[in-house]
Amino acid sequence: MATIVLIPGFWLGAWAWDRVAEPLRAAGHDVVPVTLPGLAERAGEGPQGIDQDAHIQAVVDLIEKDDLRDVVLAGHSGGGITAYGVVDRIPERIARIVFVDSGPLADGTAHIDTAEPEEQEDIRRQVEESGGAAIPVPPFDAQADPVNLAGLSDADLALLRERGTPQPWGVSTGPLRLTNPARYDVPSHLVASTFPLEVVEQMTAAGHPFFAEFAAARTRSVHAVPTGHWPMFSEPARLAEVLDGIARS
């Protein structure tokens, strides 16, 4: 069976993968959920001074310290950016990369660049009003954000609000630096939750800048887990099934 390393998205820690990790372990996989610096139980390490490079290096250090090889590396949302940075640094240790409602950014691109200008302005205002070092935990209001929060129960939403941690601002603004062409040799898989498969395929074929790196992968596939942006809570069994299938492929 495979070693599966799970990187959470913004505001979350390793705990976010609990419902996915359990069935994967039952299937025989070695599952390693990660908490990144400045978040959850590692909140005391930040948020000041933590950027995208620090998050990438934290995962690289974990994989190298434990001598993990043939890793299936999955990153959710903003964690997918971190995962891709890890692949660029140690492609020889990664068997497959999985973007969970996420995708690989191009060299020099930052997470904040994926937002529309008005949204960027709003995020910057929130950061400034909260001290300038972190993005506050969202309200997770299903009425205000029905698409991204689709499928989440009231208990799920309360859990996200309660356990979420302000996201180090430097992780959003720090550009991804890519230098290793061997990253394209690592099979790339995209789990689409908030956008239909045909949209992903069309944007990839059209050379959309946010899918250019995915299109450049020598082996790639797209998998559907239709739900909101947080499938580890809304569709954990289905997400685990997809990850299990990818790990066995």
Image: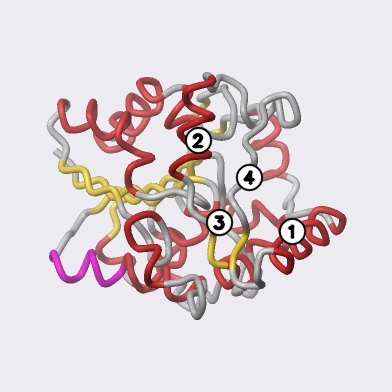
Q: Earlier in the sequence, mark 3 or mark 2?
A: 3
- Amino acid beneath label 1: Ile
- Amino acid beneath label 3: Pro
Determine the residue positioned at 15% across, 26% down. Answer: 26
Front position among marks 4 and 3: 4
- Amino acid beneath label 2: Val
Determine the residue positioned at 72% across, 52% down. Answer: 207
Residue 150 x/y as whole percent: 62, 23
Q: Which mark is residue 123?
A: 1
The answer to which of 67 and 182 lies nearer the viewer is 67
Residue 173 x/y as whole percent: 64, 71
- Amino acid beneath label 4: Pro
| Separation of residues labelled 3 and 1 (CA atoms) | 21 Å
Q: Which mark is residue 138?
A: 4
* Numbered disc 3: secondary structure: loop
* Residue marked by disc 2: 191
**Residue 233 part of the magenta-drawn span:** no
* Residue marked by disc 3: 104
Determine the residue positioned at 72% across, 37% down. Answer: 202
* Numbered disc 4: secondary structure: loop
Picture quadrant of residue 212: bottom right
